[in-house]
Image (tube, rainbow, N blue to C red):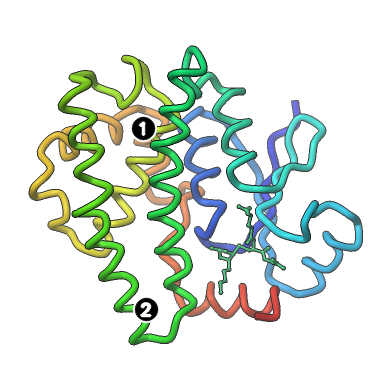
Amino acid sequence: AAKPKLWYFHGRGRMESIRWLLAAAGVEFEEEFLETREQYEKLQKDGRLLFGQVPLVEIDGMELTQTRAILSYLAAKYNLHGKDPKETVRIDMYADGTLDLMLMVALAAFKPPEEKEESLALVVKKAKTRYFPVFEKILKDHGEDFLVGNKFSWADIQLLEAILMVEELDGSVLCDFPLLKEFKTRISNIPTIKKFLQPGSQRKPPPDSHYVEAVRNVLQL
Ligand SMILES: CCCCC[C@H]1O[C@@H](O)C[C@@H]1SC[C@H](NC(=O)CC[C@H](N)C(=O)O)C(=O)NCC(=O)O
């Protein structure tokens, strides 16, 4: 079968969690990077963007947009979405929490410097006071290696991505979360994720001014 093809900017944004899920599932994918307004307008003109937005993922003969829908489809397709509706809704809840936190980081990149610093400080505060305490408690109460059931799921991938993203902002953020520290080591050592964390993978770097300029240029923000 053809490899999935991802259409987005050359940066994390909303597409990074999709890259993480595919990589963790051991699925090779291709990428088309939007650098010009013309590329974006052609996708729109060709009717490939349902609401005129990216991420766009071509997979299984479909053209998928809406990040959450894509992630949910991929999680189900690669058996990372729980064994029944009760497990799946927990995975969805945990994943949505990490997506909320990571979107704050993605959007902060587009703010003026002083606002950006304030936003990123708020991300670290929210991680420490809202999100990470929740996941630490889940791991403690659940007493398993993974967040849901005793099986690796999409929620575990999202949490690792979020932990690493917040650690880029504050390297000591896990000092009060011993179970999250162990979780980070455990999940980072899963072979497909270990490979994705090596240099040269399709994992994208933190947003920089070039990425922000490219997005502004393409979207005419
Ligand atoms: C000022 C904020 C700029 C954000 C730029 C991008 O970084 C991301 O975090 C958000 C966007 S991604 C690009 C943006 N896509 C979305 O907002 C998708 C939202 C959708 N609900 C999803 O989850 O996929 C886009 O195509 N916009 C064109 C436009 O709506 O006309």
Drawn side of residue 51 relative to residue 152, left or right: right
The residue positioned 78% from the left and 42% from the top of the image is 63
For label 1, the residue is 156
Crowd tier of the residue under label 2, counting other residues whose Cα lies within 10 Å: few below 14, some 14–19, many 20 or above: some
Could you tell me residue 188's position as x and y percent? Answer: 29, 36
Quarter occupied by residue 47: bottom right
User: CA gap, disc 2 to disc 1?
Assistant: 28 Å
For label 2, the residue is 116
| SS of the residue under disc 2 | helix
Q: Which residue occupies the extreme right position in the image? A: 46
Quarter occupied by residue 172: bottom left
Amino acid type of the residue that numbered disc 2 sits on in the rendered structure = Lys
Label 1 CB less than 8 angstroms from ligand 1? no
The residue positioned 42% from the left and 72% from the top of the image is 108
Label 2 or label 1, whichever comes before in sequence order: 2
Nearest the eye: 210 or 94: 94
Could you tell me residue 26's position as x and y percent? Answer: 51, 28
Quadrant location, ligand no. 1: bottom right
Crowd tier of the residue under label 1, counting other residues whose Cα lies within 10 Å: few below 14, some 14–19, many 20 or above: many
Amino acid type of the residue that numbered disc 1 sits on in the rendered structure = Asp
